[in-house]
Image (cartoon, rainbow, N blue to C red):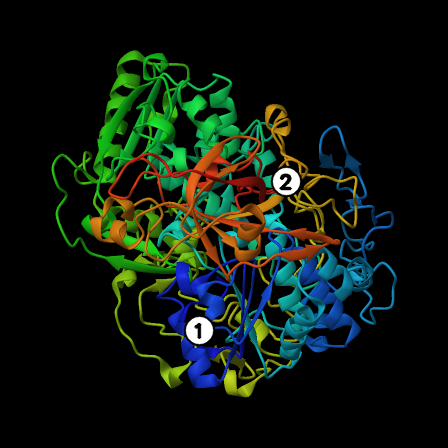
């Protein structure tokens, strides 16, 4: 989230695409109702199903899953054609005026530099033209044919209302109504907020779905302002914390990155992470990367990380591939190349695509360790449960070890919500039976590993034996200790360079925030963006002051928001080039002639002059990017690509199947289904009554939603002879499932490229463990392919067939 849940109450227009906030985020949806009740805000929902969010919307438009980019580029085209652009914002705060290198183009669904054999691009032309001074060449008049604005204008021109209807199935009149409502927020005194979730991320072009809306919001001037922003609705309360703290295979905490195998030493690693400004006088805050990186290494290895060994840089693993995401990991497991797998608080058997492949992969392991408070399907993947888990137990040699852990209500610590708020919570109960806290379990594993390395040695024991472990009880680190370590502390006294007798940072003290971190090893911080959460003032995550000056929705003394307790990212963009708010009634910060003041922590240096320093300080340009250069694998602009399994060919590029830059493993390519055998477009979704796979273990929730079902339209039911409540078989090119049929008006057929497309909705909460009736899930059917940039599986758009079957024998 660029903004926060509470800030949604400040908006004039809410657009929900790629999510269903009323159902999947019912508590946060309160702020939508606040905006509607108090500001007269409107709500638009664009979704394949008429969801519970749509039920309270002011306008609903249907869309075929996997076509959001075509819809959004159509809206951008509409705004350009109808002069609905916040020009002062777009010219000053985006890279619209910058010139792109000669040779860049887009044709027949592909950008320049495509290599079909590698399914990848040579991105050398996806960059700016630089002047002799090393800065980007710009044309502030936006007349140059190679400026970003004109390239964008050319790129989106094909997405006319007629083309949007042809691709998306959204009736032209409904599309135009949505486009007109969104375009009105190009006024400086109107804002729109975007709310999205897994409906956008779980596609083979998920990252570009989000990019497309971000570009639209920039053109409308809705980033950095109250009631605006790009707001990702995270599922679990700590999914945001997971990515923040570096639990992605290619990340370190605070969105630092792991080195690759070509970055053989510290200097080589840092050479590509300097982020020199690309325009004069810009901040380019990533120039502080070395301070954050060295402080992280000091937190990891303490005294063993010294200037002489480049702060233990060699202890870090070096990636030989871009990342070991779940698809790559299970592909390697399926090939028999993984011996063991630690599964902590996750249920891959029901969460990863192509369940049959997942089962086969787990069956090839030597050992599987499951840390979870519940008896999951993954922990019991080797048990035969009839059609719900039809395996030959005798042929599975995997040793499974279950380590019962605690649930969130039995833990103390912080959870990071969608709005980047670190909120401390306290244990409401003690763990039952043999359950232990995850931190205790991991401490025991570490102590055992270190003892083995100390006794037996090994090829490279240093990263394990030298790990900094400064906890009072080495076998049981406390939440407070971990939080303080993450915040950061002073390793050695730091004196004033102008007065060596004056100590500015005292050894052993908590750092106030990341602004004082150093690159000489005198500070340590486990996650720089969280720095400030637990400093000498105490545990700022535990603050519970509900004061909100002038009722702006900031609540600055409630918990702690990263970074620096800032509630709205890029908030300097809420003001014009003179530093005055675009909308005085929605002031957030303001330039007083000498410094930035206001309700929020300025997302810019306090004395940075408004007509000099741009608001997007994490970018080397100081501006936001409508054109992303070579930072995205599948293109500097979003482009419409069909899902890998689609009921129609791509109307814009019929020869291109799926996202051309998405990684596809050989055996999975052969398992993609075609529309002649699988004519129906399926999608997955969640229900309010169940929380993923947890609550099916709870009798009350099992009563509320007891049985697995699939949802189809009345028209499809009539065509296939399926009765409401009757039994159906649904199958893809990978597997088959059985379910009850829910026939509703919430799904209607769409006409896409002249063809009737029926949508099948499949909820995901059932399995063969727990209190609910045994059932299947969409991952039994979904293809093993992911987003081109971050490999999130394509759960939201795939092909199936369906038929009526006899009820099972009781």
- What's the mark number on residue 32? 1
The crowd level at tag 2 (other Cα within 10 Å; few <14, some 14-19, many 20+) is: many
Horizontal and vertical percent for residue 29? 40, 68
Horizontal and vertical percent for residue 58? 53, 76
- Which residue is at a point 38% across and 83% down the rendered structure image? 551
Residue on which disc 2 sits: 645
Asked if residue 725 is positioned above or below residue 22 in the image, the reply reads above
Q: Quadrant of residue 113?
A: top right
- Which residue is at a point 77% across and 60% down the rendered structure image? 163
- Which residue is at a point 59% across and 80% down the rendered structure image? 579
Number of the front mark, 2 or 1: 2
Asked if marks 2 and 1 touch (Cβ < 8 Å), the reply is: no
Depth order, front residue of 600/362: 362
Residue 247 in view, yes or no: no
Marks 2 and 1, how far apart at CA:
34 Å
Dot 1: what SS? helix
């Amino acid at each position: 989230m660029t903004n926060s849940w509470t800030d949604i109450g400040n908006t004039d227009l809410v657009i929900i695409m790629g999510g269903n906030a009323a159902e999947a985020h019912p508590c946060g949806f309160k702020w939508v109702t606040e905006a509607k009740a108090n500001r007269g805000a409107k709500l638009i929902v664009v979704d394949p199903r008429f969801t519970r969010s749509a039920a309270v919307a002011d306008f609903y438009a249907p869309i075929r899953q996997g076509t959001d980019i075509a819809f959004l580029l159509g809206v951008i085209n509409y705004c350009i054609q109808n002069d609905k652009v916040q020009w002062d914002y777009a010219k000053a705060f985006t890279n619209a005026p910058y010139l792109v290198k000669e040779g860049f183009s887009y044709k027949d669904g592909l950008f320049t530099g495509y290599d079909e054999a590698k399914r990848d691009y040579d991105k050398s032309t996806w960059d700016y033209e630089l002047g002799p001074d090393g800065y980007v060449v710009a044309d502030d008049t936006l007349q140059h044919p190679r400026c970003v604005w004109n390239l964008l204008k050319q790129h989106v021109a094909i997405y006319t209302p007629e083309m949007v209807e042809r691709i998306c199935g959204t009736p032209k009149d409904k599309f135009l109504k949505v486009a007109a409502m969104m375009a009105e927020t190009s006024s400086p005194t109107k804002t729109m907020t975007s709310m999205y979730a897994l409906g956008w991320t779980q596609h083979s072009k998920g990252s570009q779905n989000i990019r497309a809306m971000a570009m639209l919001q920039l053109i409308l001037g809705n980033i950095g302002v109250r009631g605006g922003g790009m707001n990702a609705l995270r599922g679990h309360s700590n999914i945001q914390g997971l990515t923040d703290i570096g639990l992605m295979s290619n990340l370190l905490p605070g969105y630092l990155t792991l080195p690759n195998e070509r970055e053989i030493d510290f200097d080589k690693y840092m050479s590509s992470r300097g982020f020199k400004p690309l325009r004069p006088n810009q901040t380019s805050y990533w120039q502080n990367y070395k301070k954050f990186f060295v402080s992280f290494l000091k937190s990891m290895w303490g005294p063993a990380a010294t200037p002489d060994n480049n702060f233990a840089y060699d202890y870090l693993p070096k990636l030989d591939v871009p990342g070991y995401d779940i698809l790559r990991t299970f592909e390697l497991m399926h090939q028999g190349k993984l011996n063991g797998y630690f599964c902590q608080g996750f249920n891959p058997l029901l969460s990863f695509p192509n369940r049959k492949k997942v089962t086969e992969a787990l069956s090839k392991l030597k050992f599987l360790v499951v840390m979870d408070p519940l008896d999951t399907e993954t922990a019991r993947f080797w048990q035969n449960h009839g059609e719900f888990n039809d395996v030959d137990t005798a042929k599975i040699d995997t040793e499974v070890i279950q380590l019962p852990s605690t649930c969130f209500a039995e833990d103390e610590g912080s959870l990071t919500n969608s709005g980047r708020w670190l909120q401390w919570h306290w244990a409401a109960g003690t763990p039952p039976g043999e359950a232990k806290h995850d931190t205790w379990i991991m401490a025991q594993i570490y102590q055992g590993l270190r003892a083995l390395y100390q006794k037996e040695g090994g090829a490279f024991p240093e990263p394990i034996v030298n790990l900094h472990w400064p906890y009072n009880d080495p076998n049981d680190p406390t939440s407070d200790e971990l939080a303080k370590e993450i915040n950061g502390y002073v390793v050695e006294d730091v004196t004033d360079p102008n007065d060596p007798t004056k100590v500015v940072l005292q050894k052993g003290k908590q750092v106030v925030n990341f602004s004082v971190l150093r690159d000489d090893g005198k500070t340590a911080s486990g996650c720089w963006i969280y720095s400030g959460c637990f400093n000498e003032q105490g545990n700022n995550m535990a603050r519970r002051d509900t004061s909100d000056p002038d009722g702006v929705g900031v609540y600055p003394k409630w918990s702690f928001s990263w970074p620096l307790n800032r509630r709205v990212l890029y908030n300097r963009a809420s003001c014009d080039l003179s530093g005055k708010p675009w909308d005085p009634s929605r002031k957030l910060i303001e330039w007083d002639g000498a410094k930035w003041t206001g309700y929020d922590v300025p997302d810019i240096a306090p004395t940075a002059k408004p007509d000099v320093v741009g608001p997007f300080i994490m970018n080397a340009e100081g501006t936001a990017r409508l054109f992303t250069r070579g930072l995205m694998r599948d293109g500097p602009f979003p482009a419409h690509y069909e899902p890998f399994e689609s009921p129609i060919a791509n109307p814009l590029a019929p020869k291109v199947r799926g996202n051309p830059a998405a990684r596809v493993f050989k055996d999975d390519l052969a398992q993609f289904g075609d529309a002649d055998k699988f004519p129906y477009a399926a999608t997955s979704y969640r229900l309010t009554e169940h929380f993923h796979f947890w609550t099916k273990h709870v009798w009350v929730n099992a009563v509320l939603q007891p049985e697995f079902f699939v949802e189809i339209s009345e028209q499809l039911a009539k065509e296939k002879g399926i009765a409401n409540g009757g039994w159906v078989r649904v199958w893809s090119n990978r597997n088959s499932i059985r379910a009850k049929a829910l026939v509703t008006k919430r799904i209607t057929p769409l006409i896409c490229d002249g063809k009737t497309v029926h949508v099948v909705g499949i909820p995901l909460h059932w399995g063969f463990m727990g209190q609910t009736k045994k059932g299947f899930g969409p991952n039994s059917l979904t293809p093993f392919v992911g987003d081109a940039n971050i490999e999130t599986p394509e759960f939201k758009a795939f092909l199936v067939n369906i038929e009526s079957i006899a009820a099972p024998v009781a």
